[in-house]
Structure formats: C-alpha cells, structure tokens
Amino acid sequence: MYWTKIQTYLRLTRIHSAVLTALAPVCTAAAMGHTLPLSHYLELFLIGILFHVYLFVLNEVQDVSIDKQSKSLAGKPLVDGSITLKNAKIVVFSSVALIFILTFSFFFEQALILIAIGLVALVFGGLYDFLGKRFPHADYFIALMLFFVALYGGFSVSTDISLFAYVIAFLALFQMLINNIIAGLKDVDHDYLDGGLSTPLRLGVQIKGSQFFISKRFMAYVALLKTVHISLMFLPFMVGWMPYEDWQLYMVVLLVFVSVFFMVRFLTMKVFERKKLMRAIGFHEMFAFMAIPFLLLGFIGYVAMFILVVLPVVWLGVFLVIMYGKLMPAI
C-alpha cells in the first residue's frame, strides 16, 4: 500500500524527467571553472529537483480539468483521484519552502542573491503553469525559469559569472524552449477541448482522424530555434572559452546530428501516435543534452563527464521501471 502511494506521488512529480532540470545548475556551476566539492554539486542537484517538482506538480494542478477530457490521460494521479488537489498543492508549497530553507543551509554566504534568482525562476514557472495554455508563446516563461535555475548554480559559486557559464545557461533556456514547444505536439488531440491553445495549435498543427498535419510555419519556427541552439553549442569552441581537444568537437557534432535526426523524424510524422511521438521527442532531448558534458570536459574531467552523459539515461530508465514497471510506458 505504501509503495503504491510512493509510486503515485513519483508520477505526480514526473520525477523520471527531473534529471535534466536538476543538472542545469550543476552544469553552470561546473562551467565556472572552480574546484568544488562533490557535496556542492549534490546540493545543487537536490535543489534543481525541487524546482522541477514545483513546476510540474503546479502544472498538473492547473491542467487537471483539461487532462480529464483526454482518455489517454485517465491514469494521471489527479485525474483518477489517487491524489487529491489539496495534497498536490501541499507538495507545491513544500517544494518552494524547501528551496528557500536549503538555500540558506547550503549556500549561506550567497543566500540573498540565490533567493532572488530562485524567486524569479519560481515566478516564471508559475506564469507558465497559470497561462501556458492560453498566453501566446508562453513556452518562453518555462524556458526563462530554467535559465534562472541554471544561473542559480553559477551564482552559488561566485557572483562573477563567466561568459562560458552564461552560454551554458542559455543552452538550458533554448533546450527547454524547444522541448516544451515540441512536447505540445503530443497534446494537440485534447488541448483545445478546454480552450487551451498551445504553440503547435497556434501555428496550425492539426489532427484529422488519425492523420497528423504539422504545418510549415511550425516546422520553420522550430528549425529557427534549433539553429540558434546549435550556434550556441559551437560558440565556446569558436571563441576559446573552454579547453578542448578536436575529438570533443567531433562528438558534439555527432550528438547534434543525432538530435536533429530525431527532430526531423517527429516533424515529418503523418499519423498521430502519441507513444511513438513521445519517444522521438525524448530521444531528441536526451541527445541534445549529452553534448553539454563534452563542452565541460576540460573543467570536470573524464569521470564526471561520463557520469553526466550516463546519469540522465539511467535515471530515466530506473524511475520509469519504479513507477510503471517498464521502460516504455504509455504516459
């Protein structure tokens, strides 16, 4: 009984996808080029998870009326009633309180500026959760939240943020922006039912029967954002903001190519298959992130780089099995 309840709350927090949010401040802290104890990174990772919990549980609370109108989302904890709205709201408020408490506990000397940065991140996250389905291009709110969550990591090290750390933060922003826009594709079958109008719907993406129509406007918009994202990825190599060897550049090129491959794959789908679509979107997100550890190698070493590459995959697999009993659940 207790284990079932734990699984339900893990599903509510979408803990399986928390790892990339949690690694955003870790990566910017590493990009500062300072020698830091492992505990510093673990503390940032924990606080990053709390930002994720706040964002996604509040999103579940706000979207419950829309989710109830989709048969494919009938198993969500707030939809099937396995968790009450009251308890979900307690999770939201608790995560915010813990962010502030742990900030003072872990980073007392930088606490004031970190609290300010954290508040800005929470505000942007809240704006997305409250306005995301109705405000035009609200994806920028969630992207800005992750940008400030990433900056939190840099400022936990020093108030003198390096240009390389800012690039890592902007990479986090554009990856979240792109991921959130394309993730809207999986919900076009039901978002409009409660008056929601996501970016894909605004840009003409439609489902007619089982046929999936992705407009040229949507493709062009995503391609433009991806071009900016890729340009930021290679900027540190061009201006020499971090030490690197040629093979690192080749690995980044390869990972960018693979992420673009999966992007093209879901942008050219003709039949709406939610599970297949989510898989392609997930692979795009994962391979896009994997390039970051290769940018950081000169600062963190091979062992840490390997951990950053492998951890998201292991984390995702472990928590999917814990929550759903399989690696490819219909969620």
Image: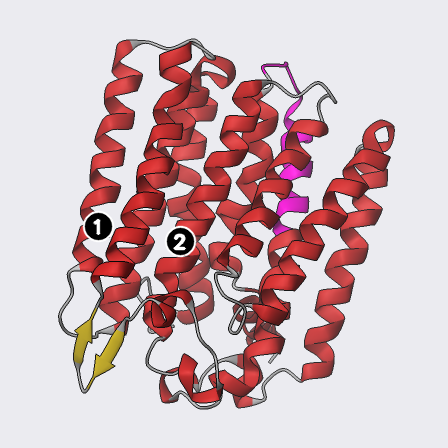
Question: What's the amino acid at mark 2?
Answer: Asn
Question: Which segment did they paint magenta?
Answer: 33-49
Q: Position of residue 27 (x, y in %)?
A: 54, 31
Q: Secondary structure at mark 1?
A: helix
Q: Which mark is residue 44?
A: none
Q: Is residue 121 visible?
A: yes
Question: Could you tell me what secondary structure mostly forms the magenta stretch?
Answer: helix
Image location (x, y in percent) of residue 40: 68, 29
Kind of residue at disc 1: Phe
Q: Are marks 2 and 1 in contact (CB under 8 Å)?
A: no
Q: Which residue is mark 2?
A: 179
The residue wearing badge 1 is 262
- Please indicate whether residue 197 sits to the left or right of residue 271 in the image: right
Quadrant in which residue 181 is drawn: bottom left
268 in magenta = no
Task: Give how far across and how far down residue 204 sits, in percent.
Answer: 29, 71
**234 vs 23: above or below:** above
10 Å crowding of disc 1: few (<14), some (14-19), many (20+): many
Q: Picture coordinates of residue 113 (x, y %)?
A: 81, 34
Q: Is residue 329 visible?
A: no
> Residue, x 48% and y 61% (percent of image)?
137
Q: Secondary structure at mark 2?
A: helix
Query: Which quarter of the rendering shows the C terminus?
Result: bottom left
> Relative to 29, does residue 181 appear above or below in the rendering?
below
Residue 43 in magenta? Answer: yes
Foreground residue among 320 and 90: 90
Q: Give the mark nearest the N terminus, 2 or 1.
A: 2
Q: Is residue 262 left or right of residue 88?
A: left
At label 2, counting other C-alpha atoms closer than 10 Å, the crowd grade (few under 14, some 14-19, many 20 or more) is some
Residue found at x 29% / y 26%: 252
